[in-house]
Image: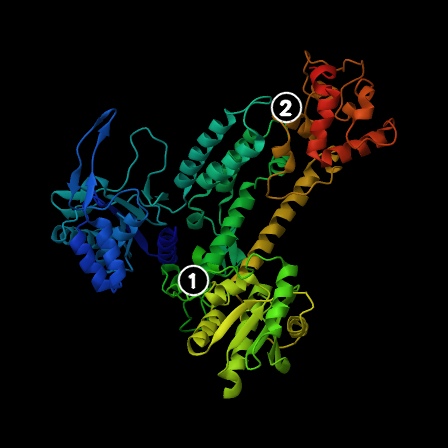
């Protein structure tokens, strides 16, 4: 999706400048079968790949044999002289390296992933775009002829993207025999003409209506299939169906969200538009279409009656609504835009162009595209650097050595007491209270405290960053000391095993600068990293903890401590959580007092009842909450004249009747969580039922003991 988002950004930027965009997609014919091994190795050598990678690719593509099996018949093995095996995860990577020469000829106007290539042009007229694209396509075909890469002419497609209402739709004439016509729909079709590239459908006005229709259609088909797997009484557990929805329905519907969703609003073309800096993005219909597929999937997950309120479906299944799902995808995309490396195609596209003249000269222009807008939802961080993995001795050893915290504390004290007097020990720790994040370190030698330090991190950080930063700051102080200290063996002791893994081996993306400086110091000094269990009355660790808490209260933030990747990730999660809470608060206002009295929370996790209860029991469990079930008031409301309104004991059916029925109370002594006396008043009955439904296993046990819905409360 990164390439699609890059193309959409370029297109939106061109449209904002009043230009028109034309795109042509090409597909390599028999791509994986036509790869030539020697040419691939030559190109990889020119690209600068190390010899061991070249040898691995050579071995992967050498001495390959295939045979064909049809039913019981199998052919002999035949040697394969070219191509790369389809289905291998390495094959697309090798083929992208094979085509890199073609794509790098004009990286601004050419995008490619495996064998799918997109060329585009922008200008004032579509005719000029068509002429420029004709030359681009001819160059690509000439390169293909020279490198024995054949393109499939029948798969070449053309789409013009413009805000103009004209019907101008010129073709791209490459040669007299090769003309690429704009995409069209068959006669009588009411679908919007669109071009499909990398799974995303682009239309002429870049509304993505066709894309939403295609994705929602596929998601609906999957949801209907899941719905056919179960009924009220029979079928897989609801928890299993929920997994199917999360795995199949939601990703299918949300594919390509990065291309079309940048929030409910978008930057206005100019500040005078509607008198606002932001206007509606007009994506409400898209979200409503997705919501219908999600609602169908939620109904397929749990056994409920058709009239059950939609809001309760999402709460009782732990599934997201369409709005919550696209907002989550939006925050994830914002985090990715802020944390890709500088060489990534999206990194430069997040930057705003400067204002060169007039009022505001020297400042930055307003965001004009989704990529620029979404990136600014989170503060900028230091972009990670791509470094090769490192595996020094001991880097794969479990820091805890499989010991419990108490065992490790005793072993650490023994180790520390037997340490040579010349060794230097740096105790480090991190602390976080709300947005106050700090680090502290204490340096010992021969059991004597030599120096301490503390500092404060940016509020957009987490305690993990403080642990890593504190480890580097402590080591920096030790290696910067006089030679009688810095040239000794240095032990860095901390209580965060996650940080230890990164300090020993490969840096995490958050606070990467501290990791890399730490690694550089280990190359020139004798540095060891050891786990020190926290809060076990170890003097150095306790002192570092106090210093870290004091550092978090400092006024000034360390100069090299800026917002971190994990810090903005935490910010994104909190924002998504607030969005869910706001939706549930608004949803509760729409629900009946009967449902609100349960005081339920909305979480995106599998409710315990879905895994603990059988489908019939889950049906009754949910009906008691919503009131939509086999109850007298419900049948009267919807005029079910043939329904039985009374229990076998003669009383009217209602949601709480299972604990009030005299026949059910006959087995009172066997009730789970049995109260001191039979619940006779309505308050006592509701109180006991509430306690019973907090534990779905006890609810199932109650149904088994009383056989209420099987024999007493028959429909």
**Image quarter (top left, top right, bottom left or bottom right) of the C terminus:** top right
Q: Position of residue 382 (x, y in %)?
A: 47, 68
> Could you say which disc has been placed on residue 602 in the image?
none
Residue 534, quarter of picture: bottom right
Q: Residue at x 23, y 60 (%)?
A: 44
For label 2, the SS is: helix
Q: Position of residue 135 (x, y in %)?
A: 17, 54
Question: To which quarter of the image does residue 669 belong?
Answer: top right
Rendered location of residue 667, percent (x, y) = 80, 21
- What's the mark number on residue 616? 2
Of discs 2 and 1, which sits in the foreground?
2
Residue 416 location in percent, x, y?
60, 72
Quarter location, residue 620: top right
Q: Is residue 323 visible?
A: yes
User: Which residue is painted at 50% across and 83% down in the image?
Assistant: 486
Q: Secondary structure at mark 1?
A: loop
Q: Nearer the viewer, residue 207 or 330?
A: 330
Viewer-proximal residue among 280 and 493 = 493
Specify whether residue 558 is in view: no
| Cβ atoms under marks 2 and 1 closer than 8 Å | no
How many discs appear? 2
- Between 428 and 403, the residue placed more toward the observer is 403
Query: Where is mark 1, residue-wise?
Result: 350
Q: At x 54% / y 27%, what residue is drawn?
A: 236
Instruction: Establish if 166 lies above or below 40.
Output: above
């Amino acid at each position: 999706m990164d390439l699609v988002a890059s193309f959409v950004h370029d297109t939106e930027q061109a449209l904002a400048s009043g230009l028109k965009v034309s795109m042509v997609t090409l597909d390599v014919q028999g791509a994986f079968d036509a790869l030539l091994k020697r040419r691939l190795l030559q190109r990889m050598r020119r690209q600068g790949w190390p010899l061991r990678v070249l040898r691995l690719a050579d071995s992967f593509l050498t001495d390959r044999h295939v045979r064909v099996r049809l039913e019981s018949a199998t052919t002999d093995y035949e040697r394969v002289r070219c191509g790369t095996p389809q289905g291998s995860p390495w094959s697309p990577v090798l083929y992208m390296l094979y085509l890199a020469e073609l794509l790098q000829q004009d990286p601004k106007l050419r995008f490619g992933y495996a064998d799918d290539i997109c060329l585009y042009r922008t200008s004032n007229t579509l005719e000029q775009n068509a002429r420029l694209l004709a030359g681009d396509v001819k160059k690509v075909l000439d390169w293909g002829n020279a490198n024995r890469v054949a393109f499939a002419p029948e798969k070449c497609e053309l789409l013009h993207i413009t805000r103009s209402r004209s019907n101008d739709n010129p073709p791209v004439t490459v040669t007299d025999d090769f003309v690429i016509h704009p995409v069209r729909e068959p006669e009588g079709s009411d679908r919007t003409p669109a071009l499909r590239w990398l799974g995303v459908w682009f239309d002429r006005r870049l509304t993505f209506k066709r894309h939403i229709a295609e994705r929602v259609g596929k998601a609906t088909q999957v949801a209907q299939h899941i719905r056919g797997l179960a009924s009220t009484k029979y079928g897989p557990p609801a928890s299993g169906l929920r997994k199917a929805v999360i795995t199949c329905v939601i990703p299918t519907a949300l594919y390509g969200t990065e291309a079309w969703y940048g929030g409910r609003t978008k930057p206005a073309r100019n500040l005078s538009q509607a008198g606002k800096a932001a206007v509606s993005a007009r994506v409400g219909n898209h979200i409503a279409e997705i919501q219908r597929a999600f609602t169908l999937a939620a109904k397929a997950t749990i056994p409920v009656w058709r009239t059950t309120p939609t809001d309760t479906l999402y709460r009782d299944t732990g599934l997201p609504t369409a709005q919550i799902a696209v907002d989550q995808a939006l925050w994830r995309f914002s985090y990715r835009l802020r944390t890709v490396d500088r060489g990534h195609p999206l990194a430069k596209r997040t930057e705003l162009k400067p204002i060169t003249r007039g009022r505001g000269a020297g400042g930055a222009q307003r965001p004009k595209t989704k990529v620029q807008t979404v990136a600014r939802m989170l503060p900028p961080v230091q972009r990670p650097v791509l470094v090769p993995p490192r595996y020094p001795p001991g880097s794969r050893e479990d820091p805890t050595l499989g010991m419990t915290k108490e065992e490790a504390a005793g072993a650490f004290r023994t180790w520390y007491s037997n340490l040579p007097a010349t060794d230097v020990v740096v105790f480090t720790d991190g602390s976080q209270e709300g947005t106050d994040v700090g680090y502290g370190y204490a340096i010992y030698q021969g059991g004597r405290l030599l120096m301490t330090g503390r500092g404060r991190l940016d509020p957009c950080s987490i305690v993990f960053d403080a642990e890593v930063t504190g480890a580097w700051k402590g080591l920096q102080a030790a290696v910067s000391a006089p030679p009688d200290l810095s040239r000794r063996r240095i032990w860095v002791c901390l209580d965060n095993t996650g940080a230890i893994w990164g300090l020993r081996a490969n840096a995490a993306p958050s606070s990467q600068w501290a990791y890399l400086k730490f690694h550089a110091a280990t190359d020139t000094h004798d540095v060891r990293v050891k786990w020190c269990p926290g809060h076990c009355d170890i003097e150095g660790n306790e002192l570092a903890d106090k210093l870290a808490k004091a550092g978090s209260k400092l006024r000034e933030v360390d100069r090299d401590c800026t917002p971190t990747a994990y810090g903005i990730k935490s910010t994104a999660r909190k924002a998504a959580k607030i969005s869910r809470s706001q939706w549930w608060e608004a949803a509760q206002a729409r629900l009946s007092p009967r449902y609100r009295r349960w005081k339920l929370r909305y979480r995106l996790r599998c409710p315990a009842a879905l895994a603990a209860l059988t489908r019939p029991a889950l049906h009754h469990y949910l009906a008691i909450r919503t009131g939509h079930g086999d109850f007298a008031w419900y049948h009267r409301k919807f005029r079910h004249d043939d329904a039985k309104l009374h229990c076998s004991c003669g009383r009217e059916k209602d949601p709480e009747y299972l604990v009030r029925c005299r026949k059910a109370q006959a087995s009172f002594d066997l009730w789970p969580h049995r109260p001191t006396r039979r619940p006779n008043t309505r308050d006592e009955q509701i109180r006991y039922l509430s306690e019973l439904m907090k534990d779905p296993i006890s609810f199932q046990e109650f149904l088994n003991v009383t056989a209420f819905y099987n024999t007493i409360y028959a429909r």
